[in-house]
Image (cartoon, rainbow, N blue to C red):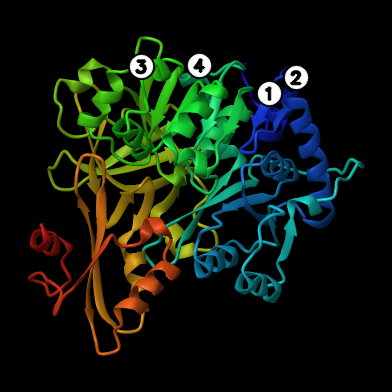
Amino acid sequence: MTFNSTLVKRFKFIAEQFSSNPAINDAYGQLISYSTLDEWSEKTANALSLHIPAGQRIAIFNDKSVVAFSLMIACLKAGIGYINLDLKNPIHRLKSMLTQSDVCCLYWNDKFHAPHELTEFLADKNIGFNSFSEISSNHCKIEKKTTISNLAYIVFTSGSTGEPKGAMITHNNLIPFIDWIRAYFEISDKDRFSNLNPMHFDNSVFDFYGALFNGACLNAFDEDTVSNPAKLISALCEKQCTIWFSVPTLLNYLLITKSLTREIVDKFRYFVFGGEGFQKSQLFKLFSLCSSNTKLVNVYGPTEATCICSAHTISNNDFIQMSGLPPLGIINPYFEYSIKHQNSSEIGELIIAGSAVGNGYINSTQLTEDSFKIENNVRSYATGDLVSLDSNGLLHFHGRADNQIKHLGHRIELEEIEAIISQINGIESIITVYKPIDPVGGEIIASICVNNFYDETIYHSEVERLLPAYMRPNKTILMTSLPINRNGKLSRKILLEQIS
């Protein structure tokens, strides 16, 4: 199959070709076919188009139900951008995302009861707040104008300014990405994707678009199932999943609990992992469980470049040297890249360019100009990731050019943590570091100087209120003064040396 049309036409083609095939087996166990998904999403798109013009944006508290997934498809059909949000985000962070993206409506599961502070905010901003059941079906066909330049979705990531930033991805960005997934992983209508990733997390882009735009089935799992090894393994087998994609943290957890056996692993064609480093010592345990039927693939890519921009299939050669991380691999064919070297070092910042590089950050002109450039009508993005190229043409990761970290699969700017905690009463100054503690992960450590207004109980309560769980410091150290370097600037390097 080759596709030279829009994203909407592609889905229509897939839905017609595989009309009776299963499209979604949702987190509640509801299974629908491609023809039903096409019908539902078409009616929803018509209903949306009655009230929301193409080019506008909506937000979704996505519960991985068939209705929520259908709403995402409907947005694509109607030319409306969507933002999947996390119910567990602090209210002030949700407000920031909703304000930045200038949404006109927020949709949520009928069972969800929004906090009064959020509904009051939505009313003040004149943002509609509707349950999924209130999306009335419209049986009249409405002309919907969509183009490949339409915004598909926004994913928010941590921002060094103290506020999250929303990366914009268009229909045009997604088309080569979907084609690459189909070709690299040899996707057929017999495949079953395991949607383990939360829908607000950019790894879910691989699940959703890789499955539903290539004729495979999307099997969704809720948070409770994913966090329970025995329950998860049982559900994976029941839904006959063939494609796995998660952060290494989840795979490590299943290895530690001995939940993954050779028999279970052999049921999958691919275990795909990315979003953070996978130490070879742990990776080898998984590799040892794989027969020739199962391949392991390390993928890499920033949110700003449509989820994935490189891949590397793991082989025996990757374990000749057991230290460090596996290669990032070879940049995908729809990208061009360069390495911005400093001095004579072989290590430099990775710059990627091409049709899958997104349109910058929503309503953040300066942030966009700082990281994105356009030359000869080709958009490039400075990733901030430090890499090198080996003699086999494989990229290797060597850290960051800034203070961004990967923790539990999430991209976190330490400056955002510092900016939020510094607002707490009694905090004079703060510096945060990320300290690796074992091959599996690390911990965020906050060092603070306080004044007489500091109250430890209030401090911990405010940290819990203001920061998402994955951004909260694992430890907080009280200091009389924070370490500085020769230039008089706060030094994370010195702090790490002091606490190691």
Q: Position of residue 395 (x, y in %)?
A: 27, 32
Query: Which label belongs to residue 20?
Result: 2
* Residue drawn at x 53%, y 68% as measured from the top left: 91
Q: Nearer the viewer, residue 355 or 422?
A: 422
In the image, what residue type sits under mark 3? Answer: Arg
Q: Quadrant of the N terminus?
A: top right
Q: Quadrant of residue 290?
A: top left
Q: Mark 2 or mark 3, which is nearer the start of the sequence?
A: 2
Q: Nearer the viewer, residue 233 or 19?
A: 233
Residue tagged by mark 3? 262
Name the secondary structure under disc 1: strand
* Residue drawn at x 59%, y 64% as measured from the top left: 98
Q: Position of residue 355 (x, y in %)?
A: 51, 37
Q: Mark 3 or mark 1, which is nearer the start of the sequence?
A: 1
Q: Mark 4 or mark 1, which is nearer the start of the sequence?
A: 1
The answer to whether 299 is drawn above or below residue 261 in the figure is below
C-alpha distance separating marks 2 and 4: 21 Å
Mark in front: 3 vs 4: 3
In the image, what residue type sits under mark 1? Answer: Pro
Q: Nearer the viewer, residue 258 or 204?
A: 258
Residue tagged by mark 1? 22
* Residue drawn at x 63%, y 44% as measured from the top left: 149
